[in-house]
Image (spheres, coloured by chain):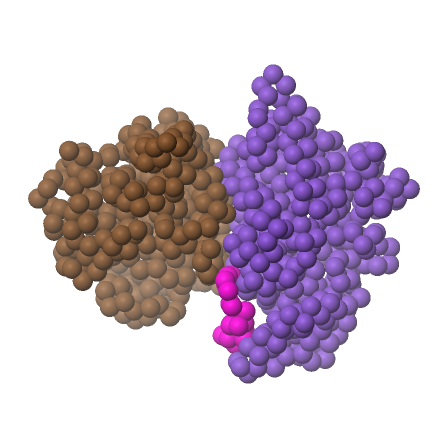
Chain colours: A purple, B brown
Amino acid sequence: MLGFKYYTPTEVYFGSGVEKNVGEEIKKRGYKKVLVHYGGGSIKKSGLFNVIVESLDNSDISWIELGGVEPNPKIGLIREGIELCRKENVDFILAVGGGSVIDSAKSIGLGLVHNRDPWDMIIDGIIPEKSFPVGAVLTIAAAGSEMSNSHVVTNTEGGLKRSLNHDLLRPVFAFMNPEVTYSVSKYQTACGIVDIMMHTLERYVTPDKDTDLMDRMSEGLLVAVKEAGKIAIKEPNNYEARATLMWASSLSHNGVTGCGKTAPFPAHKIEHELSGKFDHISHGAGLAVIFPAWAKYVYKYDINKFCQLATRVWNVEMNFDHPERTALEGIEAMEQYFKSIGMPTTLRELGVGEDSLEEMADKCTGFGKRTYKSYVELGKKEIIDIYKIALGD
Amino acid sequence: MLGFKYYTPTEVYFGSGVEKNVGEEIKKRGYKKVLVHYGGGSIKKSGLFNVIVESLDNSDISWIELGGVEPNPKIGLIREGIELCRKENVDFILAVGGGSVIDSAKSIGLGLVHNRDPWDMIIDGIIPEKSFPVGAVLTIAAAGSEMSNSHVVTNTEGGLKRSLNHDLLRPVFAFMNPEVTYSVSKYQTACGIVDIMMHTLERYVTPDKDTDLMDRMSEGLLVAVKEAGKIAIKEPNNYEARATLMWASSLSHNGVTGCGKTAPFPAHKIEHELSGKFDHISHGAGLAVIFPAWAKYVYKYDINKFCQLATRVWNVEMNFDHPERTALEGIEAMEQYFKSIGMPTTLRELGVGEDSLEEMADKCTGFGKRTYKSYVELGKKEIIDIYKIALGD
C-alpha cells in the first residue's frame, strides 16, 4: 500500500426528495447569489428546475441561470459563465446536471477565484490555490464529479479535451435523488454504468502490489454496479438499481477505491482523444471501446491481476493450467456485458476508422512530448496499436 | 437503500513517516496552542512523542501535554483536560493514541466549545452545535475514532459507559503511519481486529433490504481484515498487514459501510455494560464475546443475511436444504477465527458469571426505560438471554 492523502469533504444528501432542501443548505453556508448552471433544458421539462429555484426562493437566495452545457463541456460557455458571474456578483454556483454540468461549474469557479482563463490554467499546468464554492444536484449517475477532485473541459479549437484534478475542486455538497435519474435514456444509463465501472477499474488494474483491501472493496462495488446496471436498463424506474448506480458513481470516483495505489488512468487518457474529436461519442461509450482494447494490450504483463478481476467480478472459472486464458476470458466477459447493456465495443461501431488513429495518438501524446506509464510505456506507437485493437477488425 | 447523509471531512495522511508533518498541518490551519493528549506513556518510550513535539516546535506551535488516558476513557481526566485547556488558552487538541485517547480529546473539545460538562451533555441528550478542532496521530488500528462522528466516555461513578455521535465530532485530520502500530501487542492487535470487523458487521447485519452495494463493499473489507489480521498476529512488523488494518479501521467506522442502512449497533450497546463495569475487559474482547451471542439469538429472523455473511465472508458452503445450518456455521466460523487470533468468545473466559447479568441488563436498558430494536425488541429479558448465551456454558 503506497502512502496517500484521502480527503472527501463533500456533504452528501441522498434519497427521495432531498433536492427540496438545496436552498436551505446554501443559506446555512451564508451565500447570497447563486448561478444555477445546467445543460440542455431537460431539467425544465422534468420540473426539477422549478423545485430547485422554489427552494432557493423560499430561502431568500437570489439566483440567475445559465443553461446550455453540452456533453464534453466547452470552454466557450465556461468563459461566458465567468463573465456573467463577475457581472452579477455570484458567490455560489449550483450545478444541476451530470458530470458535464458539474465540470463546467468547477471550471467557471476556477476562473473566477484565480482571475485567469481556466483553459490556460490547464494548459500551463497552474496548480489551483483557492476554491470557489460549487454545489451539485445530480441528475445522471456516471462521472462522479459530484464528489471528485477532477474535471474535464473541451476546447473546440483543435478538438482538445483536458483534465485538471485538485482537492480544491471537490463540490461542497451534493444532493442525490435516484428518482431524478428515472428519465435518463437507456443509452445514457449504459454510458453511465461504463463510466462508473471505469473509475474503479482504472484504479484497480495497476501494477501496485499488496492492495487487498482496496481490491476487494472495488470488486464489491463492481459486482453491485454490474447487477444494478442490468436492472436499471430493463426497469428504468427501479429505485434500488438507480440508487445503487447513483451512490456507486460517487464512491467510484471520490478516491476511496484508489487509496494506496497509483492511478495512471491510461484508458481515460486514450479515450479523451476520441470523445474530444468526435462530439457524437459519449465518454462512457468511448471507454467501453478503449478499456477492453487497452486490457488486451497489457494483460500479459499482469496475468494474476487480470485473473483476479475475471474470477471475482466476471464469474470466470480459474484455469490454473492456462491462467492467460482466464485473464482474456474476463476481458471478453466484460465486453459481453457492455454489449448486453447496449454499448459499443469497437471503434467501427462508433464510425471511427484507421484514418483518425494517428491524429488521435499524436494529440494524446502532445505530439510526442508525453508518454503514459501503464505496465509499459505508452507512446504514440503503442497508443496506435491499442486503437487498432479497438477497431475490432 | 434508505435516504442518508454522508459527510467525512477528515483529511487523512497515510504512510510511513507522515507524522513528521503534523506541526506544519496545524500551522497551515492557523492554530497556535496545542494540547498533546495521550495515554499511558508508551509514545514516550517509542520516541513518537518526540517526533510529534519536534514537528510542533519546528512549526513554532506552542504546546502543553496531558497524558494518562486509560482504556475506556474516564470523565475525570476529561474534566481535568477542560480546565487545563481553558487556563492555557489551547486552541487545538492533538490526540496521539488510539480510540480512547481520541475519544477523550473529542470530549474535552465538546466541553470547551459548549462551556458545559460533557458527561451531562451525553446524559441530558444535548445536541452539539459547535466544533472544537481535534486532530489525531493514530497508534492503534481499532476504534476508527480518527474519522468517525462518535465517541464513548466512561463514568466510574456507577461504571457507566455512554456514547454520543455527531458530525461535529469528526477530527479535522488524521495522520496514520502503519509502522507506529508494529509495537501493539498481539492481544491488543486482536482486540483491534474484532473492533474493526464489528463496526462493519453492526452496519451489515440489519433488517434493511436492497443494500447490495454496501453489503458487497463491506464483505470486501471484512475479508481483507480477516486475512490481514492473521498475518499481523504472526508478523507484527508486516507493513501491508498493519496498513490494511489501519486503513480498514477508519473505513469501517467513518460511515461509508453504513450508507442507506439503519445501524442500531445492538452488540455495542450490550457490550458497553461489560467493559464499562469491568475495567479489565477491552471493548474488542467484549465484542468478540457479545456479537456471536447476539447473532445466535437473532439469526433465525434473517437466515438469508446470515447465510450471505457465512458464505461470502467465512467461506461456508451454502446448504440449500438447511440454510439455518449455513447461518449458524457462519457464526461458528467467526468464533473460530476470533479464537485463532487469541480472543475470548465466552463471558466465563472473561471471568464474568451469572451474578452480573441482571445488573448489566438493567443498566443497558436504563432500568427498563429503553429497549433496542434489532430484528426483535431487546429489553431486559432479551438482553439477559443474550448474556446467558455469551456465558458459553
Side of B103 relative to A257 (left or right): left
Residue B191 place in picture, x, y as percent: 31, 38
Q: Residue furthest right?
A: A355
Side of B159 relative to A250 (left or right): left
Q: Which residues are magenta?
A: A12-33
Which residue is found at the position 75% from the left and 52% from the top?
A: A282
Instruction: Count all numbered tags in the image, as a single digit.
Output: 0
Residue B138 place in picture, x, y as percent: 40, 46
Side of A33 relative to A156 (left or right): left
Asked if residue B327 can be seen in this view, the reply is: yes
Residue A241 place in picture, x, y as percent: 55, 52
Magenta stretch encompasses residue B257: no
Q: Nearer the viewer, residue B131 or B274?
A: B274
Answer with the quarter of the image where residue A319 lies.
top right
Which residue is found at the position 39% from the left and 46% from the top?
A: B204
Which residue is found at the position 69% from the left and 37% from the top?
A: A335
Q: Check the image and report above or below for B171 versus B140.
A: below
Magenta stretch encompasses residue A26: yes
Give the quadrant of the C terminus of chain B.
top left
Q: Nearer the viewer, residue A95 or B313?
A: B313
